[in-house]
Image (cartoon, rainbow, N blue to C red):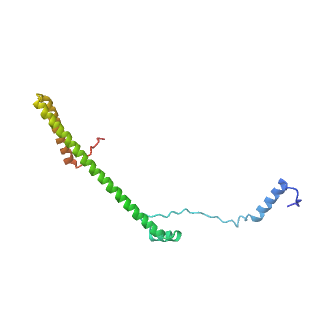
Amino acid sequence: MSEMDDDQPPTPKEISDTRSEAQETTSPRPAERTSEHQVPQFFGWKGPLPPPQALAAFDDVVENGAERVFKQFENEGNHRRKMERLHLTAQVQDLRLGKMLAFVFVMSMIGTAIYAISSGYPTLAGILGGGVLTSVVWAFVRIASDGNPEVKQDT
């Protein structure tokens, strides 16, 4: 490195010379070079809870870490069971409402058919009464045959 005055900035050649000298002194010779390999690792588990080693590691990282993991697991389970209960309750209410509305519809069609007969319209009464009777019998047969009241779509 050449001598520099304190008030003059270094020239590009002097900077380049300084870099090359630093590289020569710090870079290892080819025989001294070592290679480092990084191997990615994955640590996981199957199931809802981690193994005991992982729980111990959680305790090392966060105070009461394992207890917090268990508490979260319990909270998630409680939430899932609550949502399943709400879903089943809604399904039962839906089925009850559907049965009540079907009953009202059937009774009104039968009442209309009776009124049509008494008014002198036997053809209309036969169509209304027969259509309602056919629909109700078909619905009961379908439910009894597959046990599922939901409509199946043909694919």
Query: Residue shown at 20%/44% (left/top)?
Result: 142
Query: Residue shown at 20%/41% (left/top)?
Result: 104
Q: Is residue 47 left or right of residue 37?
A: left
Query: Residue shown at 43%/64% (left/top)?
Result: 72
- Which quadrant of the structure image shows residue 134? top left
Provide residue 143's location: percent of width, then percent of height. Answer: 21, 47
Relative to the observer, which residue lies in front, 108 or 3? Answer: 108
Provide residue 37's location: percent of width, then percent of height. Answer: 60, 63
Q: Is the C terminus in the top left, top right, bottom left or bottom right quadrant?
A: top left
Relative to the observer, which residue lies in front, 151 or 38? Answer: 151
Residue 100 visible in rendering: yes
- Which quadrant of the structure image shows residue 23? bottom right
Provide residue 144's location: percent of width, then percent of height. Answer: 19, 48
Q: Is residue 46 left or right of residue 147?
A: right
Q: Is residue 113 left or right of residue 152?
A: left
Is 138 drawn above or below residue 41 in the view shown? above
Q: Could you tell me how many numbered marks the image carries?
A: 0
Q: Is the N terminus in the top left, top right, bottom left or bottom right quadrant?
A: bottom right
Is 137 drawn above or below residue 17 in the view shown? above
Residue 54 visible in rendering: no
Provide residue 77's location: percent of width, then percent of height. Answer: 38, 62
